[in-house]
Image (cartoon, rainbow, N blue to C red):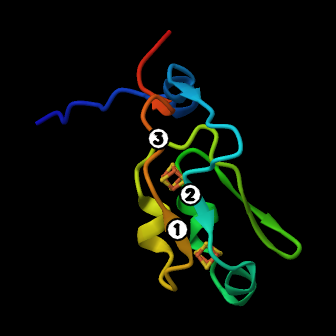
Amino acid sequence: MNTPSLPVVNVEEKLFQNRYRVDAGRPHIRIREQAGCRRCQTKPCIVCCPAGCWRLEEDGVDLVVDGCLECGTCRIVCAGGNIDWNYPRGGFGILFKFG
Ligand code: SF4
Ligand code: SF4
């Protein structure tokens, strides 16, 4: 029996169809303490975020919420609870499926 082949999906192309309204100066996700990130051995937020919002820095991690998909993955994988996570204010944040 033939198994149906799955369609090839280009994730970056799909993400490009979204739009994001920046709430300047009011990021909806914050790192509570950089010291906690420096102690964090595995830094799962960097590899688990589908939007690439987290980056490894020499003194911890950097977070830029522009493009955040509001999936909540970073909050779940941060075992130390070092992330203050909220939805954006109304009218800001991700707008799915444009283009
Ligand atoms: S998982 Fe949490 S504590 Fe670890 S680097 Fe990411 S935000 Fe910091
Ligand atoms: S909520 Fe999802 S998309 Fe947004 S920063 Fe966290 S892991 Fe990335």
- Residue lying farthest to the bottom in this orientation: 39
Labels 3, 1: front one: 3
Q: Earlier in the sequence, mark 2 or mark 3?
A: 2
Left/right placement of residue 20 relative to residue 6 reads: right
Give the secondary structure at mark 3. loop
Query: From the image, which quarter does the N terminus lie in?
Result: top left
Q: Which dot marks residue 29?
A: 2
Mark 2 neighbour class, 10 Å CA radius: few under 14, some 14 to 19, many 20 or more: many
- Quick check: 27 above or below 67? below
Q: Is mark 1 within 8 Å of ligand 1?
A: no
In space, the residues marked 2 and 3 are separated at their CA atoms by 11 Å
Residue 66 occupies quadrant:
top right
Q: CA distance from mark 3 to mark 1?
A: 15 Å
Label 3 sits on residue: 89
Q: Amino acid at mark 2?
A: Ile
Q: Residue at point 48% right, 62% down?
A: 85
Q: Residue furthest right?
A: 58
What's the residue at 71%, 45% (across, down)? Answer: 25
Measured in 3D between alpha carbons, the distance from the residue under mark 1 to the one under mark 2, in whole angstroms, is 6 Å
Q: Residue furthest left?
A: 1
The reply to whether dot 1 and dot 2 touch (C-beta < 8 Å) is yes
> Percent position (x, y) of residue 75?
46, 67
Under tag 2, what secondary structure?
Answer: strand
Ligand 2 is within 8 Å of the C-beta of the residue at disc 2: yes
Which residue type carries mark 1? Asp
